[in-house]
Image: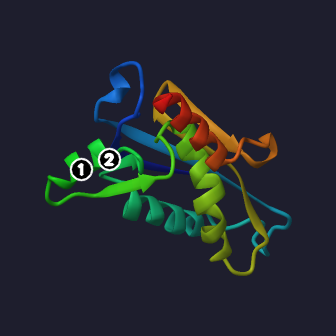
Amino acid sequence: MRKVQFCAGHRLLGHEGKCANLHGHNYLVEFHVTGREVDELGRVVDFAVINKLFKGWIDDNWDHGFIVWDQDKNAIDALKQVEPNKIYQLPCNPTAENMARYLLTEISPSLIDNIEGYDLQMTKVVVWETENAYAEATLDAKPESLPEMTDQVRNAIYS
């Protein structure tokens, strides 16, 4: 397991409380990688390799930026007024749950494929939104698919 810290802003479209406003967090993400074998040194994979790929992706895409739902046109338009800006549009509301699932199912597979010589799988991603609150997504939990979940959220907001 490798931890990656980053700072980012977001808002939750349709939230019934304070989280409907643009705000930020000091996030911590745990990437849980498993493998079938260990290398000649006794490792599943070097932690530095995981850090380079996953921290690199987080730094390039989410760190010190705003993570917003691609359907949140109001927030996107407002954030684009600020120059420079860093906006990452998710296909779902940027809850910790959705962010964990997105990292696990959409981002991790292609990053793991870049690691040659190992048979690895990302089995769990945990997103800590605060020091007291986190959400996790695991492969063995058989979570709802992201598109189905997004449709459910969209229907709840616009119904």
Which kind of residue does numbered mark 1 sit on? Asp
Q: CA distance from mark 1 to mark 2?
A: 6 Å
Image x and y of residue 2, in percent: 59, 53
Most distant residue in the top direction? 17
Residue name at image x 14 percent, y 58 percent: 83
Label ID, residue 77:
1
Residue name at image x 43 percent, y 41 percent: 27
Viewed as shown, does residue 153 lie left or right of 90?
right
Image x and y of residue 30, in percent: 58, 47
Residue name at image x 74 percent, y 80 percent: 117
**Disc 1 + disc 2, Cβ < 8 Å:** yes
Which SS class for mark 1?
Answer: helix
Q: Is residue 47 above or below residue 158?
A: below
Q: Within the image, what quadrant is residue 109 found in?
A: bottom right
Most distant residue in the right direction? 36
Characterize the local packing of mark 2: few (<14), some (14-19) or many (20 or more) Cα atoms within 10 angstroms.
few
Residue 51 vs residue 123, the one in the foreground: 123
Q: How is the image coloured?
A: rainbow
Which SS class for mark 2?
Answer: helix
Most distant residue in the bottom direction? 116
Residue 134 vs residue 98, the one in the foreground: 98
Which kind of residue does numbered mark 2 sit on? Lys
Label ID, residue 73:
2
